[in-house]
C-alpha cells in the first residue's frame, strides 16, 4: 500500500479476491521456518483483509503429521525438516496468525499439503 493508505492502482473491484498465502503461526513464531519479514508485511495484509473480509481466501500449508510421511520428494523434504511436522510443532502452529484468524469467517481458508496453492489441491 502507498504511504497515503490508498491502493496503488485504486480500490478493488467487486469481483476481486485477496489471496493471502501461508500467513501462519509456524512462519511467525520461533520455529525453524520463522520468516523475519512477516511482522513487517502484516500491517499491510491486515489493511487489505479488513477492507473486505468476505473477499479473502487464506491458504495454509499443512506439514506432514510425522517424520516419514509425504509422497515423492516431500518424504525427503521432511527428512530434512523433521522438526516441522505437526507431531513436533503441534497442530495450532499451522493456524493463521491471530490477527488474521479473526477474519474467518467470513474469509475462507484453503488447506494444502504442498507449497503451491495451485498444485496438488
Image: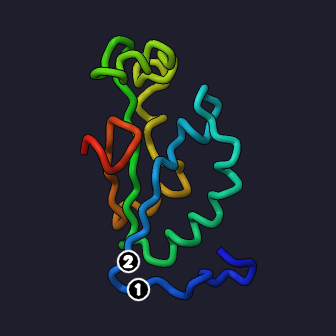
| Viewer-side residue, 90 vs 31 | 31
Q: Is residue 76 above or below residue 105?
A: above
Residue 89 lies, in percent from the top left, at: 49, 24
Number of numbered discs on residues: 2
Of residues 8 and 43, the one drawn nearer to the viewer in this rendering: 8
Give x and y (percent) for residue 11: 51, 86
Q: Which residue is mark 2?
A: 16
Residue sitting at x 64%, y 84%: 6
- Marks 1 and 2, Cα distance to the nearest angstrom? 5 Å
* Residue 103: x %, y % from top left: 44, 63
Q: Quadrant of residue 16?
A: bottom left
Question: Residue pushed farthest left?
Answer: 121
Q: What residue is disc 1 on?
A: 13
Q: Quick one: 92 or 52, which is closer to the camera? A: 52
Q: Count residues near mark 1 (Cα–Cα under 10 Å), then give few for <14, some for 14-19, many for 20+.
A: few
Look at 44% across and 42% down and name the residue there.
Answer: 95
Of the 4 image quadrants, the one containing the C terminus is top left
Amino acid at each position: 500500500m502507498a504511504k497515503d493508505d490508498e491502493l496503488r492502482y485504486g480500490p478493488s473491484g467487486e469481483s476481486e479476491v485477496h489471496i493471502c498465502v501461508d500467513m501462519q503461526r509456524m512462519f511467525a513464531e520461533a520455529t525453524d521456518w520463522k520468516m523475519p519479514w512477516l511482522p513487517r508485511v502484516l500491517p499491510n495484509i491486515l489493511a487489505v483483509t479488513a477492507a473486505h473480509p468476505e473477499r479473502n481466501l487464506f491458504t495454509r500449508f499443512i506439514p506432514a503429521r510425522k517424520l516419514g510421511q509425504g509422497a515423492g520428494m516431500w518424504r525427503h523434504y521432511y527428512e530434512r525438516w523433521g522438526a516441522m511436522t505437526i507431531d513436533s510443532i503441534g497442530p495450532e502452529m499451522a493456524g493463521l496468525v491471530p490477527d488474521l484468524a479473526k477474519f474467518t469467517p467470513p474469509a475462507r481458508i484453503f488447506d494444502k499439503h504442498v507449497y503451491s496453492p495451485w498444485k496438488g489441491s
